Amino acid sequence: MTLPLMPKATAVWLIEKTALTFTQIADFCGMHPLEVQAIADGEVAQGIVGYDPVANSQVTLADVRRCEADSNGRLKLIITTLPAPKRLRGARYTPVAKRNDRPDGIAFLLRNYPQLSELQVGKLLGTTKETIQKVRERSHWNSANIKPRDPVILGLCTQTDLNAAILQANERLQREGRAVPLPPPPEADEAA
């Protein structure tokens, strides 16, 4: 069931401004009737400013009046025709402790997944095209110490994000009619 925006604040407003029963408010806000009663008694949600669902187009005033007259009536949330907002990722933050691991992750992706574009690698690891290019050309200031290591294990990206980027790159190659490269076989552990 879809709930109104800010359910507790909406419940506060409905308690203060309407004659709806606690059960009606609880059903609309996705709360327990005892929690609504505690809000009305001032035991819960102290200091929460009421949020007007009528002014914010979540319910109509006519629907509120109808439910005030009929204690068995239930408020219905207005279904918006606006598309749900896309969850966009902001700039990827890498903690200071993991920043030295980033070139290792870049080297791993360049070696094992050559089909990934620089843009995809940059988004996955939160790095710049310039850094990717320097790691590829071995002109990075620390290139002598760069060892390709899995960025998922390093905590620079999630396995889900990596799999999605690889799938997207493979689909792009298939559309262009090029063969999808296979990753190199896993190397034997040198420490063994």
Image (tube, rainbow, N blue to C red):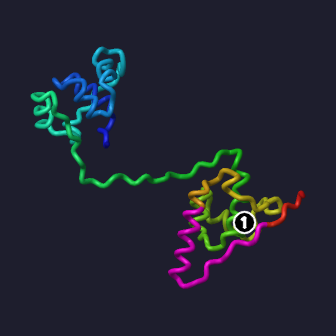
Judge by depth and name the residue closer to the eye, 115 or 100.
115
Judge by depth and name the residue closer to the eye, 189 or 54.
189
Residue placed at 59% from the left, 70% from the top? 117
Judge by depth and name the residue closer to the eye, 178 or 138.
178
Q: Where is residue 172 in the image (x, y as percent from the top left)?
A: 53, 76
Query: Which quadrant holds residue 15?
Result: top left
Asked if residue 52 lies left or right of residue 68, the reply is right
The residue under label 1 is: 135
Number of residues whose C-alpha sits closer than 10 Å to that of mark 1, classed few (under 14), some (14–19) or many (20 or more): many
Asked if residue 94 lies left or right of residue 40, the reply is right
Query: Which quadrant holds residue 124?
Result: bottom right
Number of callouts in the render?
Answer: 1
In this view, 53 is above or below 88: above
Q: Position of residue 62 (x, y in %)?
A: 11, 37
**At label 1, which amino acid type do we have?**
Val
Residue placed at 77% from the left, 60% from the top? 141
Query: Which quadrant holds residue 86?
Result: bottom left
Q: Position of residue 166 (x, y in %)?
A: 59, 67
Residue placed at 72% from the left, 64% from the top? 108
Q: Give the range drawn in magenta.
A: 163-186
